[in-house]
């Protein structure tokens, strides 16, 4: 059984002239959101064995906050297939061959398309949201276990 933890990056700087999309940083609220995600993952007993992150700065920073808050001394793998304009089917196939708990940090609408490619579920992952997908390679099936927003995580 493989668990895929799919996290949309936290709140970031708005798109403005002078700052390229790839260089937009997390804002304070985004850091707080990622700490909340880390707390949730710890409470649920999810300890990632592998981390994959989009190369865009806000996703990299989001992954760093989660790893730091969880006290994990791991390096995230930067994955071009997590860029917002990429086809998620390539990454979905790669994930099907993995084991353990894989944390993915990326962007919309790519992450929702990834969930659909894995499970056929139609979802929208809000900023700072988490989707948990369980994959059973022996039975060649995947299912969406959880979909949480920041609002729900605040209540937990």
Image (cartoon, helix red, strand yellow):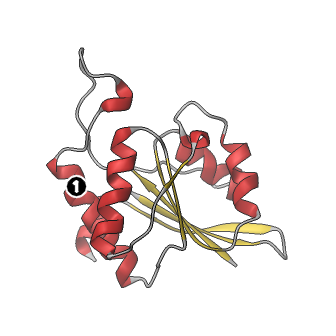
Please indicate, yes or no, whether residue 111 appears anywhere in the rendered image: yes
Choose top left, top right, bottom left or bottom right for residue 102.
Answer: bottom right
Foreground residue among 53 and 6: 53
- Residue 43 position, x and y percent, is 35, 83
73 sits left or right of 108 in the view: left
- Residue 45 position, x and y percent, is 44, 85
| Residue under the image location 22 percent in, 34 percent down | 13
| Residue under the image location 39 percent in, 75 percent down | 41
| Residue under the image location 32 percent in, 76 percent down | 71
146 sits left or right of 24 in the view: right
| Residue under the image location 78 percent in, 68 percent down | 141
Q: Secondary structure at mark 1?
A: helix
Q: Residue furthest top?
A: 17
Question: What quarter of the picture does the C terminus occupy?
Answer: bottom left
- Residue 77 position, x and y percent, is 53, 54
Q: Which residue is mark 1?
A: 31
């Amino acid at each position: 059984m493989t668990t895929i933890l799919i996290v949309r990056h936290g709140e970031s700087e708005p798109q403005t002239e002078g700052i390229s999309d790839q260089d937009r940083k997390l804002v304070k609220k985004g850091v707080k959101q990622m700490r909340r995600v880390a707390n949730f993952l710890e409470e649920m007993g999810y300890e990632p064995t592998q981390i994959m992150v989009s190369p865009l700065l806000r996703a990299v920073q989001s992954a760093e906050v989660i790893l730091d808050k969880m006290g994990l001394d791991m390096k995230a793998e930067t994955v071009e297939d997590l860029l917002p304009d990429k086809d998620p089917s390539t990454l979905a196939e790669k994930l099907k061959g993995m084991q353990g708990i894989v944390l993915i940090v990326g962007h919309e609408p790519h992450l929702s398309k990834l969930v659909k490619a894995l499970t056929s579920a139609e979802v929208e992952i809000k900023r700072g949201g988490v989707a948990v997908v369980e994959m059973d390679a022996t039975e060649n099936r995947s299912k969406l276990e959880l979909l949480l927003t920041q609002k729900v995580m605040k209540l937990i």
